[in-house]
Amino acid sequence: MTTTRTQNTDLDQRLILELKIDASGEVTRKQSRLGRKDTLEGKLLSQIYPGIQVARVSVPYELTPYEQSVVENRMAKLIYGGVEYKLAGASGSAKDGKFYFVDQAHAKQIAERFQHWPEAAIVYFAILVSDCKLMVEEPDLRIAVVQDHVLGTNDCRGWLRESLYRKLKIGTNRFCQFRLAFDTREPKQAKGGLKAMSDRVADRLGVDVILPESSCKPALKGGIRFLPQLGTSGRMYTGPAILGIKELSRVSEFGSSYTLVEHASEEALQFEVMLRAIERIRKVRKAWDEGDYESLFEVIGKSEIATFDEDVSFDPDALDQGGIPASEGWEPPEAVLLADRSGTSIKFPYVANQLNRKLARWAFRTCTGGDLKLPSFALVDDGVLIEYRGKILSASDWIPEDTSITSLTAEKGLCIRYPIRMHEDLLPIRHLSNDELIPALKQALGVPDLDNSLIAYILERQLRMEGTYILHSETAKKNGGDFDFDTICVMPSDQFPMFVAGRIACEEKFRQEKTKQKKAKSPWWNVYLVAMKARGNRIGSITDLKTSCLAAGRPDLAYKLVQQLQNALDSLKHRVEIDESVISEIRKEVNPAPWLRYKRERRVSDLPAHLEVPDTDKVGRLYNVLRKELGFLPGEHDGSFDEKMSIEDFRGLFSGEAVPKAMFEECQLVNSIYADIASRIVQREEEVKLQLKNAQAYWEAVRQSEDKEQRKSAVLARNKAQAALWEHEQEAKDQFSSLHLFVHYWAQGKEENRRAWAQAMNTVVTGGNGSGAVLFQSFPQEVVDTFAEVTGGQRVRVRLPKTIDGHVRFDSEQRAWLVERIVNPEGPDGEKKVFLFQYKGKRNLIFENTSAPATMENS
């Protein structure tokens, strides 16, 4: 028997409340997102402040001055569910108009953590809400903060004793991305990367953690003194601390993008990029024609390989969101194609739609980026810290500039960090062998007779760590890198000799590093204005404009945009802004590259067979050759996707199970909720696309008008329509993600007779006109297993989302509750019920447990 504790979501302090403020200042609650990152689990914030209540608040991007004043005023006085919330900060999502608010009781403490500095709170609050995979709370941690490069530290990179590595069950040959909260008297936080130092070194220095000053955000004030045990000046903190590990270095790969290919030499474009892509396209066509889906996915990817060709944010935090390793299973549509020996599953509407979309994304990336696969690494410095014959020895920035320590066997390579601002960002790097490295290491440490065993230890634990690429900090700065777990990829010379040689032959025309101007610092009462200025991500649009300049044969204009791109990257931290006049003038001179408009097509058939492009457009020429080679998938007339079987044709897939009426009706309820929300999202997308089309047409009609006010009005209308579509796309992703998790949680609770539940859901969905998505979202493994059984195929494991130990349950009033199991080691387990919504019929979901409905139109 279990005990039950019921809580409204408003009172559930682990769930991040999702709110939205519209242009009129009205506050509405959005659908709760149920993923791990949408709770306070695994975040420093909940460990530091137990009981804190957090809301993630979305605001519009494009606003008139009056509308912005209304929104700012509402942000300053935000009360919801009887709780007054105050703006605390943001994460990378600030550019998307999303900010974190906390309850009034904790707001002052948060402001103090960030020194009442609005820009610091907006930029660095992310430290407290990063999703950490591992976390340890230490009651008496000794933390030394020293100047960068002292004791082998570097920019945002410190040391952690090996015993703490082992406590966290991390291999000591791994580089870690960390988040740290410490000093309860004057609370502080830090972020960056960590290497392992031996316990012998740590004990000798009397520390557990060594941090460079650059890791502490915001920068520390005062308190520097000489620390005799360390033999240097710095700060020492001893007391409770919470350490979170966000990511570990690992072997991985990136896919290439058009922002890389546009810098290829003509020789490399023809004989490396194009020929490799043609070979991969032919493999795809062969696999498709033979129905060999395993070979197909080997080329187009089991899951999305990290690439930036259609990313508009370039958020470093997004790099570690690759999720579950491929070895842990397949996505349901992929799994069923592999399990089905008959080939019939490709005609299941949901499977056909998903594969068509996946192929379209791959086709665009291949036709514009060549589908090159490049090894990727965590960027790390060359710092060393050891104990030798009773002395502490350290070194920092000792390898030659423009060289690297890497596991790659190629003699040299191009180090690539996204976003690529210019061809100079492709750094030619020479790879060091041990024959050259070891003498340099001995010289850097001042020990010509260093023991071989200690050399082996240094190489394994500090210099040749798994999944790392070691650079001198001055080299890393050349394309904007530091050692806060920046992720880079490398184009090795043994695989791409022409591309590498072509880059080395190019003269250095321009150098643009990170802006190091004075940091912006506003009074705390302007925190809402600072937040509003943080909205809007211009990085993607400027990058595409730069690409259009190169395609048009105007590298002079592309170089002008390099500074603006860097300003976009640095604008929040530093007192720099994008010069809109520069952007505007360049847009008048250069038309968008024609292939850019097709990056989000959902069907291969929607990618044009040929585009008119100038000879200067390398990517456009590549597109035309590869698109012709690709042809149509399926063939232009065989219509495999278009001739999908009716959903009703799969009605007999499941049979033989006893399905009670209550089971059937509950499946009907879930299917209705799914269909209502999905159709509303699609309907809204059609509306905002039409609004943008009309606004764009009006702008085109008046853009040459001499009436300045008319042009200004048209631009504002177009910008608002563009922002509305972009905001909808972001919200639609969130809504579908929430919807899929809701269905998964619901099905997760059906532990008994799942085959009968799957049969009931299959009967429901095949009686309608949808794609059958809800069947695959609810009982994917059962669907895959059944296809394998009835066609004589093999069972394929399905990849499931990582969730809490809970499920969705409905009551008699069609209210949905997230029921989480509470483990009680001393007695019966308990349950915690969290209200999600109440379903009141067609497109009417109530997200508050009150009498006032919030329909989907307002969600």
Image (cartoon, helix red, strand yellow):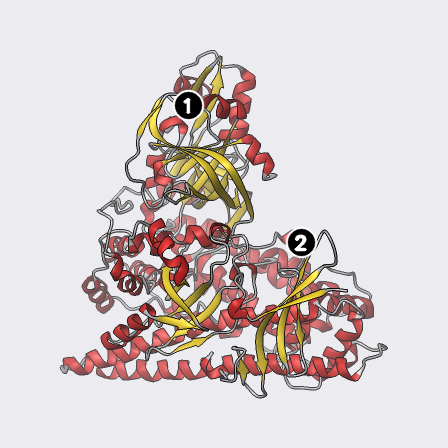
Residues marked 1 and 2 touching at CB (< 8 Å): no
Q: Position of residue 38 (x, y in %)?
A: 52, 62
* Residue 536, above or below 251: below
Residue at left offset 52%, top offset 74%: 605
User: Residue 781 vs residue 479: left or right?
Assistant: right
Quarter residue 631 falls in: bottom right
User: Residue 298 vs residue 94: left or right?
Assistant: right
User: Residue 782 vs residue 56: left or right?
Assistant: right
* Residue 690, above or below 346: below
* Residue 359, above or below 178: below
Residue named by callout 2: 328
Quarter residue 525 falls in: bottom left
User: In front of the other: label 1 or label 2?
Assistant: 1
Residue named by callout 1: 394
What amino acid is found at the position of numbered circle 2 in the picture?
Glu
Q: Secondary structure at mark 2?
A: helix
Q: Position of residue 264 (x, y in %)?
A: 39, 50
